[in-house]
Amino acid sequence: MKLPNTDELSRRNFIKSLALSTFGLSVGMNPLWGDEAPPEMAGGMAQAVIYIYLSGGISHVDSFDPKSNAEVMGETEILTSKVDNMTFGNNFVELAKEAESLALIRSLSTNQGAHEEGNYFMHTSYRKRATIQHPSLGAWVHKMSGKHHPSLPPSVHIGGGASAGRGFFPSVYQPLVVGNPNDGLANSKIRHTNSTEFAQRRKLAQAFDEDFHKVHKSKSMDAYVDVYEAALKLMKSRDLQAFNLGAEPGNVRAAYGGGFGQGLMLARRLVEHGVRFVEVQMGGWDTHADHFDRFESQATLLDRTLATLLRDLKSRGLLESTLVVVATEFGRTPTINGNSGRDHYPRAFSGLMAGGGIKGGTVYGKTDKRGENVIENKVDVTDFNATIAHALGIDPTKVTYSSTGRPFRIANKGVPIKALFS
């Protein structure tokens, strides 16, 4: 953030800018990052989640559930792997090499066929309503797991698009948003002054504030002070380096590539430093027209970068403790439309999981010969999200109440897919 040359932006506004624009917080919130972590639950091997969201709806038959039907497949061919029955669309060459680490869920199904509603349901496990905003998975993980790091946020969202955010939870549970992973954490450095002068200004401001706080005592005012203190703590923390992609060796950055790949590399750095939940969004999957050319470009990028992430996590000994999830709001029609495209298809679609206690080399669920209907082990979106919770050791049956006293759970009434775990 650029400061005026006349230094009109006060210490107060500077740190407020950091707290508001960086953390998405508002005055009247709880202390930053919430409560300490509760005792770990048994059953969860994952310490962190990298949640890759393919916004727009990736075609299941061209990716993780290809069919031996030329009419359905069009230009896409079937690619085999070392794992029996684990096949991929031909654009996923690198990912197929990692088949022994993957679990493909081929039987997802939903009744939400529009982007906004499907995206909302996938992130919250609840259908969109005008009367309430439900918390997203990242906010739920923060709420149920507590604070795992003294200065870094528990939940970070990287890239374009938007999930449901904190929903009805207090502002403290809003995920930190990083737009461009190459920019690091915006507004986190003191500029146009030195640390000594900054400390002097802060001390002077505190002296002026003291009388004001004596007169205006309130929880909102106390929370406002907490925001400032937490922002300062993060600004001074060495763990800000977690957001610095420039610290990565050139060969590692090259392996991930630009754009979306840099987002995945940042996600790896964040979980390595103790962030609990990181979402990385990749758009461009809404292929109503010119599907095959557009899909090839998207899939090739996803294939290379996701395989790089998995190999990187393995080499660092992090894959066993990090659950990698690939999700999308729905699939796409097995029937190719008149514009050489595929339309929305909520009835059947696929997801992927790896690491975090997931049993690699697993294919769960089945669709029919055209990929139109689930015929074995149907998985609701809520079951998918309950599986993520279970991997983290979070009890998906635990009830949390909204401010109006209504009961909610991290995955609604979903049941974890126990067959996916080792």
Image (tube, rainbow, N blue to C red):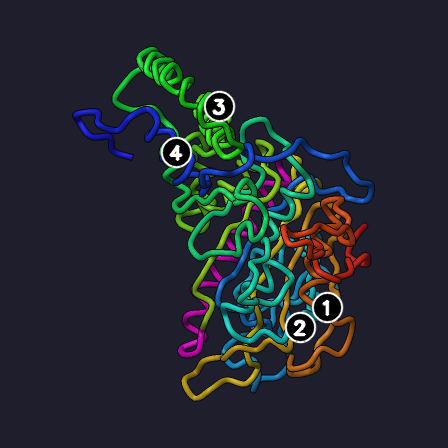
- Structural distance between the alpha carbons of marks 2 and 3: 44 Å
* Res. 404 mark: none
User: Disc 2 vs disc 3: which is toward the camera?
Assistant: 3
Q: Quadrant of the N terminus?
A: top left
Q: Dot 2 corresponds to which residue?
A: 109
Q: Position of residue 199 (x, y in %)?
A: 37, 14
Q: Is residue 295 magenta?
A: yes
* Residue 240 visible in image: no
The amino acid sitting under disc 4 is Leu
Amino acid of disc 2: Ser
| C-beta proximity under 8 Å, tags 1 and 3 | no
> What's the magenta region?
287-316
In percent of width and height, residue 303 lies at 53, 57
* Residue 414 on the magenta segment: no
The residues tagged by marks 3 and 4 sit, at their Cα atoms, a distance apart of 12 Å
Q: Given contact means CB atoms under 8 Å apart, are the residues at marks 4 and 1 in contact? A: no
Amino acid type, residue under disc 1 in the picture: Val
Mark 3 crowd level (few <14, some 14–19, many ≥20, 10 Å Cα)? some
Q: Nearer the viewer, residue 220 or 123?
A: 220
Helix, strand or loop for the magenta stretch, by majority = helix
Return the residue found at the far left.
6
Residue picked out by circle 1? 379
Q: Nearer the viewer, residue 310 or 197?
A: 197
Q: Secondary structure at mark 3?
A: helix
Q: Which residue is mark 3?
A: 233
Mark 3 and 4 residues: CB-CB less than 8 Å, in contact?
Answer: no
Type of the residue with mark 3: Lys
Q: Residues within 10 Å of mark 4 (few under 14, many from 20)?
A: many
Q: Is residue 385 visible?
A: yes
Q: How many marks?
A: 4
